[in-house]
Image: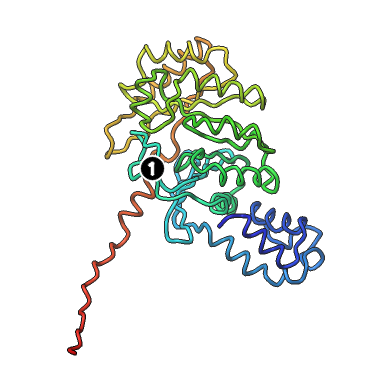
Amino acid sequence: MQIERIRERLRALGAKPTHEQRVLRDWLQARPYDHGRRRPKDFLPQPVRDALPEIDAELRGMARLLSTHPADDGSARLLVGLADGQTAESVLLPRGGLCVSSQLGCAVGCRFCMTGRDGLLRQLTSGEILAQVALGRSQRAVKKVVFMGMGEPAHNLDNVMEAIDLLGTEGNLGHKNLVFSTVGDPRVFERLPQGAVKPALALSLHTTRPDLRQHLLPRAPRLTPRELVDLSEEYARLTAYPVQYQWTLLEGVNDGEDELHGIVALLKGKFAVLNMIPYNTNPDLPYKRPSWDKARGIARWLHQHGVLTKLRDSAAQEVDGGCGQLRSRAEALKPQAEPQKPQAVMLRRM
């Protein structure tokens, strides 16, 4: 469901813009409608008050918690059920973060990612994206939302931008605490500066070599790492938020000396931070996770050579919850529909 449909329904019931804001704000912040000094009976028109239980049930029904998979680091992977029976993933992160999905599946086809193995299944609506935030906030406080879950946000740009706009207003989230992650679609660099809410930018880099990037991200836009960094730097200077470059560290693939020197040449002096994340090993894929000592040594070397580097662990390692894995397992457990038997056709003799 698009948020605009909710707005239209409220308007049809006599709601003014302030009434729309109240309903959406309370939903996104996971708080009851009767909180605070102003009660619904004092603030909302009677038809809106009468329809609130039905509207609230519809909003909650867009994203239902199917299962929670907590990890020792304080994160928790959430398997989320959507109204059409499909499932998506969100992740509650330590220190008040939440990672949300923007698509079911993904068309980019990163070779080390489970999400893209089956391609793009469908877009998530703005309502389904926002419903993940409301659901996350029903579990714990959420102060930061990152669009780094299933899907490429740039491929669902209208819905994602609508969600970001509402989170930066009615959702009461600081603009720098909304993080738009992309593989580098050119439309991102056109649209993000135009929004009233300008999120921070996270760019999936993964390598400094154009040939390797084309192999690892086979359907990403054909921009070189240098071109992507130049575009990202321009946006960072505009918003005063440093770019977060994402680097999934793959054993024997992008952890060699050539890459380290390439990173220094590319990022030294930039308004940026490099988030280096050792790969979340998946038995169905051929890539391996380097040792933590090796990863720590790489981060230390880069830091010493002028690149601000943060070594991060992929959330939910111990529950095998890498992006797309929970959904993949849940889909595999669904009962398969029995093939329909051909119906007998009776022919009437003339």
36 left or right, relative to 217:
right
Q: Which residue is mark 1?
A: 115
Quadrant (top left/top right/bottom left/bottom right) for the N terminus: bottom right
Query: Residue 347 sits in which quadrant?
Result: bottom left
Residue that extends furthest to the bottom in the rendered view of this protein: 350
Q: Position of residue 326 (x, y in %)?
A: 38, 48
Q: Is residue 214 left or right of residue 272?
A: left
240 and 226: which is toward the camera: 226
Residue 300 % position (x, y): 47, 15
Q: Position of residue 346 (x, y in %)?
A: 20, 84
Work out whether residue 314 or residue 14 is closer to the camera in this orientation and state it: 14
Q: Total label count?
A: 1
Residue toward you, 227 or 138: 227
Q: Horizontally, is 285 left or right of 80 in the view?
A: left
- Nearer the observer, 162 or 38: 162
* Residue at disc 1, secondary structure: helix
In the displayed structure, 247 sits above or below 119; it is above
Position of residue 122 in the picture relative to residue 2 (left or right): left
Q: Determine the residue located farthest toward the front in the rendered image.
A: 350
The residue under label 1 is which amino acid type? Thr
Q: Residue at x 72, y 69 (%)?
A: 49
Q: How is the image coloured?
A: rainbow
Residue in view at x 25 percent, y 67 percent:
338
Q: Quadrant of the C terminus?
A: bottom left
**Rendered residue at 58%/64% (across/down):** 58
Please report the residue visible at 50 percent of the width from the left and 28 percent of the height from the top. 203
Residue 65 in percent (x, y) is at: 49, 57
Whether 348 is drawn above or below 219: the answer is below
Q: Residues within 10 Å of mark 1 (few under 14, many from 20)?
A: many
